[in-house]
Amino acid sequence: MNGIVVALRLTREGQSTRQVAKTVDLCLNSVRRIHLWNKENVPMNSGGRPRKLDESMVNPLKLNLKRGFFKSAVQATKEADKLRTVPVSVYTFNRQHLETFMRHRLPRRNPLLKTEYKEDRMKFVNKYEQWEDPDWKRVIFT
């Protein structure tokens, strides 16, 4: 009974079933069975490299971005780099940002026109204001 309790404690700490079987001196199938019986209490390792930005880091950055403290993802990643030792790229932040279904908002681009060009446009608009669709179909734009 004592071996089962120790095996359960070790699996909850995140050790693999092989490591637990070796330290407790139980067969591998017994440790797997213990693991299956207590599956909801044992954290599952999804495998692969751990994320550079974990949830505790991403959530405040996203919140500040949503509130308008950061104007862009570049500013958010610079802030994350101040808090972390490992640098994070803008693409990493954008990928995790999009996983939460938050959309990027880009400011609307306005054409940088001189006042004389704006006046010319208004003259053009006023000149051809009365034109209908058949009139415009006869025009060739090059």
Image (cartoon, rainbow, N blue to C red):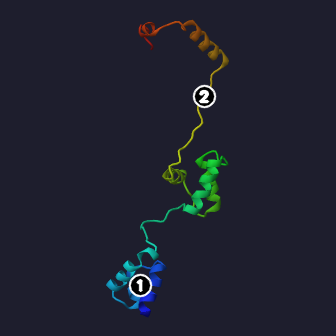
Per the image, the residue denoted by label 2 is 110
Q: Amino acid at mark 2?
A: Asn
What residue is rendered at 34% in x and 86% in y?
30
Q: Residue 109 — which label?
A: none
- Quadrant of the image containing the N terminus: bottom left
Q: Is residue 75 above or below residue 130?
A: below
- Quadrant of the image containing the C terminus: top left
Spot occupied by residue 135 in the image (x, y as percentages of width and height)? 45, 6
* Mark 2 residue element: loop
Query: Exactly how many numbered labels are in the figure?
Result: 2
Q: Callout 1: 10 Å neighbours few (<14), some, many (20+)? A: many
What residue is rendered at 36% in x and 90% in y?
26
Q: Is residue 20 above or below residue 46?
A: below
Q: Residue 20 — which label?
A: 1
Residue furthest left in the image: 29
Q: Is residue 109 above or below residue 26?
A: above
Q: Callout 2: 10 Å neighbours few (<14), some, many (20+)? A: few
Spot occupied by residue 11 in the image (x, y as percentages of width and height)? 44, 80
Q: Is residue 84 above or below residue 35?
A: above
| Callout 2 touching callout 1 (CB < 8 Å) | no
What residue is rendered at 61% in x and 46% in y?
72
* Mark 1 residue element: helix
Q: Nearer the viewer, residue 16 or 111?
A: 16
Q: Can residue 75 be seen here?
A: no
Q: Marks 2/1: CA distance?
A: 64 Å
